Structures are given as structure tokens and as C-alpha cells.
Amino acid sequence: MRILVTGGTGYIGSHTVVELQQGGFEVVIIDDLSNSYAGVVDNIEKITGVRPGFERIDLSCEEKVMDFFLRNNGISGVIHFAAFKAVGESVEQPLKYYRNNLLSLINVLKGMEMHGISPIVFSSSCTVYGQPDMLPVTENSPLKKAWSPYGHTKQVSEEIIANTASVTQINSILLRYFNPIGAHDSALIGELPIGIPNNLVPFITQTAIGKRECLSVFGNDYNTPDGTAVRDYIHVVDLAKAHVTAISRLMKSENRQKVEIFNIGTGNGFSVLEVIQSFERISGQKLNYRFAPRRPGDIEKVWADTALANHVLGWKTEKNLDDMMASAWKWEKSIRGKYE
Ligand code: UD1
């Protein structure tokens, strides 16, 4: 059971490789290291005792992807993470996002089709829902027009997979993640933002450790209990386990449709201030923050209806917000002074 994990040295990819190996799967990673480090492979090996295969390939290059599939005929499933994910950058450089995110997926699907490989788990996002009319958001909620090229690549990718699955041997599970945070308990792998973090939790931990002066809380006039925006934060290890469950389901042909879609969150919404309070509780230190204007494009609130993932996929989260923040803090302290 050899699984190709594209983007396997990235944040969610690396945690998933660990869970796959610990679940008895053999893994080969493809990553171009455009937003991650080769040393992640060493750290995965330190955690699991097994070194995953690794090839540095730009998946948007069709020739290289076809060559990879020709040389690796033992692959029985694919988990496709490789993509650019910075929302703001995608607005500045849309072609970079469409080119990379869509071509990579197209090439992977073509390789799978040619070599008769069926299962693919795809990393989608709750961003496809925009600001939903009803909360919690179910998988049947209508998709809203994407406000960023990044979000649009996720919507189009879902359609590319569905169209391809309908006429090929390919079967797919699309996982729509909510907000992944936290790090592995070992503090050997975690999120490594390059430059100034866009996301809330790395910004909190970098502020606490002294790398940033002050966290700006974007907006305190939202229609939420404390006025700050609400998200469904999920521990990256819980999220990684959802991928193992999903690929196993496809490999055992337990899926009921060619393409199945699951929300992957905790089902609980927390405000920015609640996340800060959790951080202060687990770290025992006060965080320097101030209120700032709303960030353009941010939605007010979203959290998942996870009934389908819980009942059909048979997966549920195990970690709470304090676990997430404690692991993120442990990770930030462990990388102090490294990766500068
Ligand atoms: C968004 C997308 C998510 C995508 C991710 C990629 C939605 C609902 N989510 O996450 O699918 O994968 O971008 O980057 O579209 N915040 C601050 N100060 C900061 C940073 C963030 O107050 O310095 C606030 C934001 O305004 C937001 C919350 O923290 O309310 C979470 O922000 P962030 O971590 O950036 O994630 P999303 O924008 O929710």
C-alpha cells in the first residue's frame, strides 16, 4: 500500500505522512520545496523511524510528472496537497495560482488515469462556501462566488476532479478543511510560515516569542458574541488522521459515490479573542495585541457541520483548542532561532 503524497513536506502534508506511516502505509512524497524544507523528511523519519521516499518535482511540469508515474508503478493511491495557499498573494498574482494549483492537479490526475490508479484524496477548503447563509455549514450548502483566486482554484479543482472521476476509474474524497492549527506533539514538525505570517496562530506564537511586536486583531465590530470573527479551528493531527481514514475508505472501495465530500472541522466556532485567551491560559503569558480594522475579504463567522464526517467517514476530532494552542506554542519554542 504505497501512497503518493504531493506537498508532503508542507504543513498538513507532513503530519499526514506521519499518520500514514504509523497506520502501516508506505509513502512517497513529491514536493518542489517552494514553501517547505527538505529537512522535514529527516524529522518525519525521527518521529516514525521510517524514511519516506522523496522526490523534488514541480508538479506543474507534465513531462516530469509522467516520468515519475512511469518509474513508480507500485502506487495505489494519492493524497494531493501540493498547492499555493496565500490568499492575499493570489489576489496580487492570480496567474501564479491558477497555473500552479490547476496544472499540478491536472498532471496528477492524468498520471493516475494512465496508470489505472483509482483513489485520490484532495485537500479542499471551507473557503469554497464563502460566508454561508446558515450555520453550521453542511456539505450541501451552495458554493458562493470565490473572492480570491486561491479560493477559486479550490472550487475549480473540485470540479476538475468530479468531471474526471465521472469518465475514468478515478474515485475521490474531497476534504473541505476549516482552520488547521497546532503541531505534532513531538515538536519535530509544524507550520513554517515564510516571512510575516498571514494566519492567526503563527502570528500569535511569533508575537509571544518576540519575533513580532504586536498582534492586530482584525475587526471587533462583527456580529459575534465578543465582536471578533469566528472560525472552526482544528488540530492538524486530527486533520491528518481524516486523510488516513479517507484514503483507506477509497482503497477498500467503501465509498458510495465516485466523489464524496466531507467537512473536516470540530463543529465548534471560536472567536479571535477566545483563541488569544486559550493561548494566554496554556502559556501563562499575556499576549500583546490591539484591535485593528477588519481585514478585506474576511468573513464574519463559519463553523462546520461535521455529522457526515462523523457518521459516514467514522472520524472525529480528539483535541480541543487548548491542546491546539499548547502544541503550537511548543513548536514555536522548539524552532526559536532556526529557519530565519
Ligand atoms: C482563510 C481561509 C482558509 C484558507 C486560509 C489560508 C476562509 C473561511 N478560510 O482562513 O480556507 O485555507 O485562509 O490562509 O476563507 N486574524 C487576525 N489577525 C491576524 C491574522 C488573522 O485577527 O494577524 C483573524 C482573521 O481576521 C480571521 C482569523 O484570525 O478572523 C483567522 O484568520 P486566518 O488564520 O488567516 O485564517 P482564515 O482567513 O480564516
Image (spheres, rainbow, N blue to C red):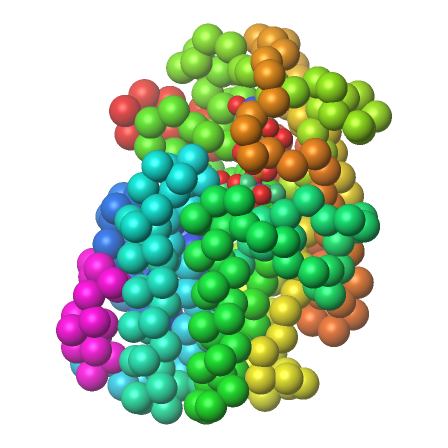
Q: Residue at x 17, y 77 (%)?
A: 67
Relative horizontal placement of residue 200, taking residue 76 as reference (left or right):
right
Magenta segment includes 59: yes
Question: Compared with residue 257, is residue 202 higher up or lower down, i.e. above or below?
Answer: above
Q: Say if residue 184 shows up in the picture.
A: no
**Which span is picked out in magenta?**
55-70
User: Residue 335 location in percent, x, y?
Assistant: 38, 28
Q: Residue at x 21, y 78 (%)?
A: 66
User: Residue 283 location in percent, x, y?
Assistant: 62, 19
Quarter of the image where ligand 1 sits: top right
Q: Residue at x 36, y 63 (%)?
A: 102
User: Residue 108 location in percent, x, y?
Assistant: 33, 73
Q: Residue at x 27, y 85 (%)?
A: 73
Q: Say if residue 97 shows up in the picture.
A: yes
User: Residue 229 location in percent, x, y?
Assistant: 69, 29
Image quadrant holding the C terminus, namely top left
Question: Compared with residue 301, is residue 276 higher up or lower down, i.e. above or below?
Answer: above
